[in-house]
Image: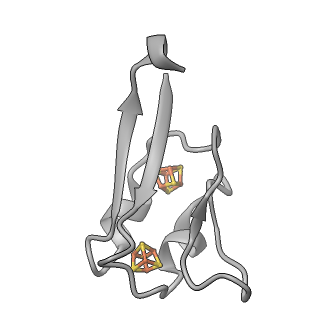
């Protein structure tokens, strides 16, 4: 299965919690970036970032494998 996480920029405050809680380096944040950046292909769909984001600014969904 393939998963994708997506940041909703209009809701995101750039707090970095999602990047901190992801155990798979699927969301990275550096000082250069105002917002977290999903790393394509790394998300395993654990939903931890969704649960921890205080602003409901992240979505995780399964990609249709026929499209990837
Ligand atoms: S936890 Fe939510 S608000 Fe904070 S950087 Fe991640 S997506 Fe943005
Ligand atoms: S769902 Fe899990 S693996 Fe995917 S970005 Fe969020 S915390 Fe990381």
Q: Quadrant of residue 31?
A: bottom right
* Residue 50: image location, x then y, percent: 34, 61
30 and 50: which one is in front?
30
The residue at the point 60 percent across, 65 percent down is 37
> Residue at the location (56% across, 61% down)?
22
The C terminus sits in image quarter: top right
- Number of labels in the image equals 0
- Residue 14, relative to residue 29: is it above or below? below
Ligand 1's quadrant is bottom left
- Nearer-the-camera pick, 36 or 52: 36
Q: Residue at x 68, y 57 (%)?
A: 25
Percent x, y for residue 55?
A: 27, 79
Q: Residue at x 66, y 81 (%)?
A: 33
Q: Looking at the image, what colour scheme do you see?
A: one colour
Query: Is residue 37 found left or right of 46 in the rendered image?
Result: right
- Image coordinates of residue 58 in percent, x first then y, are 36, 63
Q: Residue furthest top?
A: 66
């Amino acid at each position: 299965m393939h998963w994708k996480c997506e940041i909703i920029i209009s809701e995101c405050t750039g707090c970095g919690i999602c990047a901190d809680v992801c155990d798979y380096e699927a969301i990275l944040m550096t000082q250069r970036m105002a917002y977290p950046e999903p790393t394509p292909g790394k998300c395993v769909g654990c939903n931890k970032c969704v649960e921890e984001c205080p602003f409901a600014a992240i979505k995780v969904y399964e990609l249709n494998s026929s499209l990837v």
